[in-house]
Amino acid sequence: MLSNKKVLLLDMNSTFMFGEDRFDESEDFSIHYHKLGGKLQASEVNKIIRSAFDYIDVRYPDEQYRNNFPSVKTAMQETSTNSLSKKEMETLIDTFAFHELGHIPNEYLVALQNLHKRFTLAAVIDIWSPKKLWVELFEELGIMSLFNVISFSSDHGMVKPSPKPFELVMGQLEISSENALMIGDSARRDLGGANTANIDCVLVGGASSPKAICEYKNLLEFCDVIGV
């Protein structure tokens, strides 16, 4: 399986980051928003965040948006009835990002470090918010330097299963697709996008497809099997 693989492309959410996308009905987004110094009423904050989430969520699986995916700012501009100042917009986007961001368990940090010893690592990551909080977290945890290239979808508006983020990463690495392996938890997004870019894919987290070259319970089991 790995005889000719030099590069591992990693998905993030539910592959090595967990607890992301805290947008259920129990969330009060105004708590974090007011910690950031926002001045809007709690009810208005919650309405704006939920409306923006719904706007994006319905478009995420829609193929027509995979190469021109809307930003959180666009979602808020399209759904809010308020005229938001630049400062309030920035605070609302930061609040959205805070609730989108997950955490990386220590055992997954160790797994990434061990994989880095054997492979060139890159990541193909779908996020809706600007990447600032993710970059800060990666740097705080000491893993930013493990990745030679990272594609954050909010940088360029291309989301999986578009093959373009994969091709972007491969072009920056200057390596052929047969020498790369994608690892992710979504048959549609990770495997679908990778295969369209002629990259083999391993599925984790319970995802399954006859097109996957292997399936594992999680990234940790993959590491155990290949001996890293």
Image (cartoon, rainbow, N blue to C red):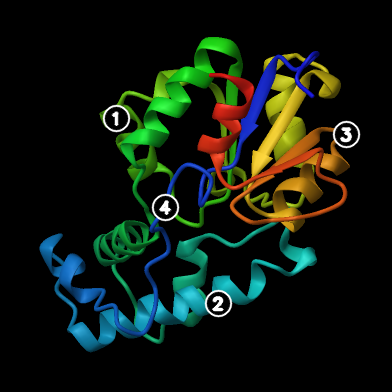
Indicate the amino acid at tag 1: Leu
> Percent from the top left, x then y, of residue 123?
58, 33
Q: Which residue is mark 4?
A: 18
Q: What residue is rendered at 25% in x and 60% in y?
A: 87
194 vs 75: above or below: above
Asked whether the beta carbons under mark 3 and mark 1 sit within 8 Å of each other, the answer is no
Closer to the N terminus: mark 1 or mark 2? 2
Indicate the amino acid at tag 4: Phe
Closer to the N terminus: mark 3 or mark 2? 2
Closer to the N terminus: mark 3 or mark 4? 4
> Percent from the top left, x then y, of residue 223?
56, 28
Which of discs 4 and 2 lies nearer the camera? The answer is 4
Label 1: few (<14), some or many (≥20) within 10 Å?
few
Any mark on residue 141, and which? 1
> Residue 142 vs residue 9: left or right?
left
Which of discs 3 and 4 lies nearer the camera? The answer is 4
Any mark on residue 55, and which? 2
Q: Measure the C-alpha gap from mark 4 to mark 1.
A: 15 Å
Q: Residue 41 versus residue 133: which sits nearer the camera?
A: 133
Q: Which residue is mark 3?
A: 198
Indicate the amino acid at tag 2: Tyr
Q: What residue is rendered at 40% in x and 59% in y?
A: 100
Which of discs 3 and 2 lies nearer the camera? The answer is 3
Indicate the amino acid at tag 3: Asn
Closer to the N terminus: mark 4 or mark 2? 4
